[in-house]
Image: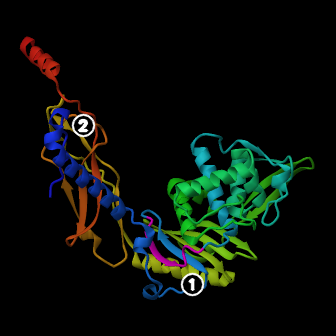
Amino acid sequence: MRFYHNYVSHRHSKRWLPAVLLSFALALGSCLCSCTQVYARPEESATDAAVSGLDPSAKSALLMEASTGTVIYEKNADERLRPASVTKIMTLLLIFEALEKNQFSLDDVVTVSEHAASMGGSQVFLEPGETQTVNDMIKCISIASANDASVAMAEFVAGSEPAFVDLMNAKAKELGMDNTTFANCCGLEAEGHLTTARDIALMSRELINNHPQIHDYCTVWQDSIIHRTRRGDSEFGLTNTNKFLKQYPYANGLKTGYTSQSKYCISATAQKDSLQLITVLMGEPDIPSRVKDLQSCMDYGFSRCKLYTDANEDALSPIPVTHGTTNELPLKYDTSMKYLDTEGRDLSAVEKTLSLPESIEAPISENDIVGEAVYTLNGTVLGSVSIRAAADVEQADFRFFFVKAARAFFI
């Protein structure tokens, strides 16, 4: 099947309007199909508990493949629960986003406020007026789950913790975390501070996919910082709260949480070859149950899942252009293609077919969709990736042809 994209001048618009509308509808439908197949919505691909054989003790659980966002298993994944220190995933995400925007550097110095130093629970005992680098603050949050460091960084990024919490909730909305409301940046118990296993997986995926340097922090087992106060310098040891790092060979993150009300929570990541999984557990009764369920979920995911990836780095041949200032249109792929299989199929048999018009009429704008690459396995469509124009091509007018003819005559 070929994919056509029509370009029609205004003076012929009435005559060709039905064709234009039909072409637009086909293009829009193809684009929407590509998005839902390549990046599957979690609720469309979740595995039922009875089929999976998994039976975690957690109140809520979710297993996700990180690159595609495909949910492999879920249990009460949309139940709003207390996340405890798993909250800090969003705090770290906003810190890394600010670093990426060059709002500050890892070497910049953060001064601890009275408010930040007053945080209870898990902490590294920062004192009012003490200074630490951004890098060391991230270590304290990632390794030791420090509430005081989290609040100090929130104030450093946004000016105050409430302003930072506003950023957290705005980011949650942006990521589609529809059942999440943050009341603080560290996860201490607060009225209305609630989220879900699905929403935690969404922010975890955002963090590890876009800021993989987080693994340089959250995989560190032991480290230290230097407290610099009026009493002098003293070393303070940091030990990772995520014992799963030592209990599972592929574990590489991410964040634990516990309060007496939330019980034991975690968003854990593990990578084996090219496959990275996220397991979220909320409301586990004890640590042994959390470890057992993590191992079961990760083993289940790695045993069932295979990832097909096409980076789409092959060169696309240009297609002819009619009535344009150039004769050919260069093309480019919109994205790479990723597909997660959980049925044990032979992914080496995946076929890729390019659907493009024989020619295209100017004018054309760069990034216009002109076709698609369709991926099939034994006749079943797995997904598609749009093919776009890689340059602008203007429509040729009388002046263009006159100049071209004149040059040809005199040269």
Q: How many marks?
A: 2
Q: Secondary structure at mark 2?
A: loop
Q: State the quadrant of the N terminus.
A: bottom left
Q: Nearer the viewer, residue 350 or 200?
A: 200
- Residue at horizontal 28%, vertical 43%? 368
> Dot 1: within a 10 Å radius of its alpha carbon, few (fewer than 14), some, or many (20 or more) residues?
many
Residue type highlighted by circle 2: Ile
Residue at 66% across / 45% down in the picture? 106
Location of residue 235 with respect to 41 vertically, above or below: above
Q: Is any part of residue 250 visible from this angle? A: yes
Identity, as a three-letter code, of the amino acid under mark 1: Pro
Q: Residue at x 61, y 81 (%)?
A: 59
Residue 114 rendering spot, x and y as whole percentages: 86, 51
Q: What is the magenta range?
A: 69-79
The front one of 178 and 139 is 178
> Which one is nearer the viewer's eye here, 203 or 184?
184
Q: Residue furthest top?
A: 410
Q: Is residue 214 left or right of residue 156?
A: left
Q: Residues within 10 Å of mark 2 (few under 14, many from 20)?
A: many
Q: Position of residue 226 (x, y in %)?
A: 80, 52
Q: Name which quarter of the figure residue 85 lies in.
A: bottom right
Question: Badges 2 and 1: C-beta atoms under 8 Å apart?
Answer: no
Q: Nearer the viewer, mark 2 or mark 1?
A: 2
| Residue that carries the numbered disc 2 in the rendered image | 364
Q: CA distance from mark 2 to mark 1?
A: 54 Å
Give the residue furthest to the left. Answer: 409
Instruction: Tell me the quarter of the image containing the C terminus.
Output: top left
Badge 1 is on which residue? 56
